[in-house]
Image (cartoon, rainbow, N blue to C red):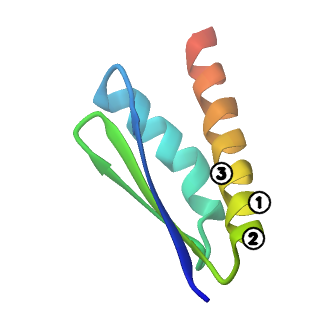
Amino acid sequence: MKVKCDLEIDFNNEEDVKTVIKSIKVDDFDFVESNIHGTTLKASIQSNSVSSLLHTLDDYLACVSVASKILDKD
């Protein structure tokens, strides 16, 4: 079985979304495809099972959260 999740996260400006995607893109591997559309980070996550998808989604969102928090400290 293949499962997929499409995710969109809006940022305040293009500079912030570019910084976040640069920080997390290295971890995309074959599971995640991340792109920028204006001020929106779009990600497509695929897996072979629901539990694996949830694990990947949790990791991805944790990385986005950390990168976003670092931006907020500037």
Picture layout, residue 32 above or below residue 73: below
Residue depicted at x 60% and y 50%? 24
Name the residue rendered at 65%, 51% in the picture: 60
Mark 3 / mark 1, whichever is N-terminal? 1
Q: Are marks 1 and 2 in contact (CB under 8 Å)?
A: yes
Q: Give the CA separation, mark 1 to mark 2.
A: 5 Å
- Which residue bears the numbered disc 2? 52
Q: CA distance from mark 2 to mark 3?
A: 12 Å
Q: Quadrant of the N terminus?
A: bottom right
Residue type for callout 2: Ser
Which residue shows up at 65% across the image and 22% down it? 70
Q: Is residue 8 left or right of residue 62?
A: left
Label 2 crowd (10 A; few <14 / some 14-19 / many >=20) = some
Which residue is tagged 3? 60
- Residue shown at 29% from the left, 33% from the top: 39
Residue 6 is situated, as x and y percent measured from the top left of the image, at 43, 58
Give how far across and how far down residue 21 sits, in percent.
48, 47
Residue flagged by tag 3: what amino acid is it?
A: Tyr
Tell me how far mark 3 sits from mark 1, CA to CA.
Answer: 9 Å
